[in-house]
Image: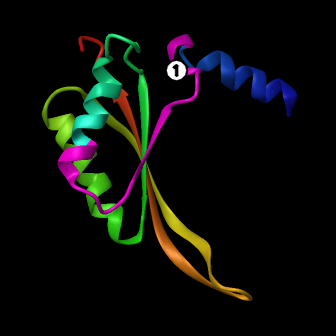
Amino acid sequence: VEMCKTFLVEEVPEDLRDPPAEMKISKKSVGLYIHAAKLFLTGTADKPPVKRLQISALGNSIDNAVSVATRLELEGLGKIDSVRTGYLEMESRPGASSRCAHIQLEFLRAQCS
């Protein structure tokens, strides 16, 4: 197993080995998240741009996460590299749980941005 792990790490390009920056989306304004994501991808005076951005959301916020990622892609800031969906067990009250839809989008910054 260790040999496979080493092999897989060697296959990943050097600039993608660091963990991605994370954005957790809620039902706030999509424009707010688009602006924040652009700052992650273009950088600021204080922080360099990130190479990868992980955008995730639960339940009714999933549409906002998809909107942010597709808008960034349409504006040429990068591309959606992967999409994962599933259900998470959430405790709804003590002793009881329910399932909640979850999405995770991996976004790669364009090399020219």
Q: Residue 111, how many percent across, how many down?
A: 30, 13
Residue at (40%, 71%) from the top-left corner? 59
Residue 20 is a magenta residue: yes
Name the quadrant of the C terminus: top left
Q: Residue furthest front?
A: 46
Does residue 83 lie above or below 21 as drawn? below
Q: Is residue 109 visible?
A: no
Measured as percent of width and height from the top left, residue 79 is found at: 29, 32
Residue 41 is one of the magenta-drawn residues: no
With 32 as the anchor, is 98 left or right in this view?
A: right
Q: Is residue 55 above or below residue 43?
A: below
- The residue depicted at 74 percent of the width and 88 percent of the height is 95
Is residue 91 or residue 80 the one in the foreground? 91
User: Residue 90's x, y, as percent?
Assistant: 60, 75
Residue 59 horizontal side relative to residue 79, left or right: right
**Mark 1 sits on what residue?**
16
